[in-house]
Image: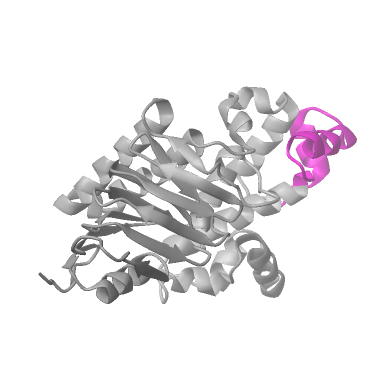
């Protein structure tokens, strides 16, 4: 049996008994890989249903027989959730792990990755997550930039609590993508994509979990919150530290100290980050030819285009023009 990939705008359905073709589709939609079928195994039959959903690639994958799949570094966050069967896996120093329908595998962007044994009866839900999108969402939730990208704990309980809820959300979205309809509309899709990113950050373990779990009112004292609210309200305003301190009701020195303690940067550095984030959001939503990088920079109070591009690249890992072209 052999079917060639049938690609619509966002959905691919693939069936094949050819290992090389099956490997190529995973390469195109997920990562470079090598699929090995052990001697004496049953008949190989790859069944893939794969959908693109903003920063996510969602796939339901099975192989009809036992396989071993080796990758290099993935370059993305990734979760494999067996719907039945199991898979033995390792990444970097994390070895001898087994994913089951109750315990999903969570992979980092870095570290050589291998699925040592995907069982014959294994059908898995594979979720690829864009690393920039996940880290950007975490920064939005925390209200500050990250010093280092988030590292997720390598296993996720998907039989209980937040992990189970997140998997149910993923399955509902995947089923909705297959059915077409509202999930193809940005006004519906974007809030769901943000909810899935936030859900993963709340379901998995990482160094920022305690901070996310605390109520926002407990994170920062009143003067810092008042200054932050002012900056978010009108980030294009030419704030000075003195003006922000007056709005916060404290001295300039106390405001500087409070920002270092609770935000990890100066008030003006935070203001710059807010402006960069607004510019990034506008460029990410914009269309080349209709949106101009220079105009966006000036709209968010960056008068020197070269310095804006340099700060933007340091913050987001790409130039403003690259964000715009990625639309």
Residue pushed farthest right?
253
Magenta highlight on residue 275 = no
Q: Residue at x 19, y 65 (%)?
A: 14
In the image, taking residue 233 as reference, residue 202 lies left or right, namely: left
- Whether 228 is drawn above or below 312: the answer is above
Q: Residue at x 56, y 70 (%)?
A: 320
Q: Measured from the top left, where is residue 311 in percent x and y?
A: 69, 65
Residue pushed farthest front?
40
Residue 276 placement: quadrant: bottom right
Q: Residue at x 36, y 33 (%)?
A: 102
Q: Nearer the viewer, residue 162 or 180?
A: 162
Magenta highlight on residue 260 = yes
In the image, taking residue 158 as reference, residue 316 lies left or right, namely: right
Residue stretch rendered in magenta on the structure = 238-267
Residue 32 placement: quadrant: bottom left
Q: Quadrant of the N terminus?
A: bottom left
| Secondary structure mainly formed by the magenta segment | helix
Q: Nearer the viewer, residue 265 or 253?
A: 265
- Whether 28 is drawn above or below 246: the answer is below
In the image, taking residue 75 as reference, residue 101 lies left or right, namely: left
Look at the image and tell me whether residue 180 can be seen. Answer: no
Q: Measured from the top left, where is residue 68 in percent x and y?
A: 37, 61
């Amino acid at each position: 049996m052999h079917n060639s990939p049938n690609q619509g705008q966002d959905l691919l359905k693939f069936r094949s008994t050819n290992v090389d073709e099956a490997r190529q589709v995973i390469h195109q939609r997920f990562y470079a890989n090598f699929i090995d079928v052990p001697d004496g195994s049953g008949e190989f039959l790859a069944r893939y249903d794969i959908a693109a959903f903003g920063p996510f690639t969602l796939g339901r994958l099975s192989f009809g027989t036992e396989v071993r799949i080796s990758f290099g570094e993935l370059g993305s966050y990734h979760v494999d959730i067996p719907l039945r069967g199991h898979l033995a896996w390792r990444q970097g120093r994390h070895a001898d792990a087994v994913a089951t329908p109750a315990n999903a595998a969570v992979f980092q962007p870095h570290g050589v990755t291998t699925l040592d044994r995907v069982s014959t009866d294994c059908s898995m839900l594979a979720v690829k997550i864009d690393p920039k999108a996940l880290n950007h969402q975490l920064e939005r939730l925390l209200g500050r930039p990250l010093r280092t990208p988030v590292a997720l704990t390598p296993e996720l309980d998907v039989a209980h609590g937040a992990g189970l809820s997140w998997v149910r959300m993923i399955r509902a979205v995947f089923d909705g993508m297959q059915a077409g309809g509202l999930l193809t509309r940005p006004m519906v899709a974007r809030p769901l994509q943000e909810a899935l990113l936030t859900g993963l950050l709340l379901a998995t373990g990482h160094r920022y979990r305690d901070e996310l779990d605390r109520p926002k009112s407990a994170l920062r004292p009143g003067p810092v919150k008042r200054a932050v609210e002012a900056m978010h309200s009108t980030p294009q305003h030419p704030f000075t530290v003195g003006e922000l301190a007056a709005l916060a009701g404290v001295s300039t020195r106390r405001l500087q100290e409070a920002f270092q303690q609770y935000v990890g940067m100066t008030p003006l550095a935070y203001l710059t980050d807010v402006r960069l984030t607004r510019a990034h959001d506008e460029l990410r939503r914009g269309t080349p030819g209709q949106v101009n990088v220079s105009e966006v920079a000036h709209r968010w109070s960056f008068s020197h285009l070269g310095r804006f591009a340099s700060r933007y690249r340091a913050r987001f890992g790409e130039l403003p023009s690259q964000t715009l072209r990625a639309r």
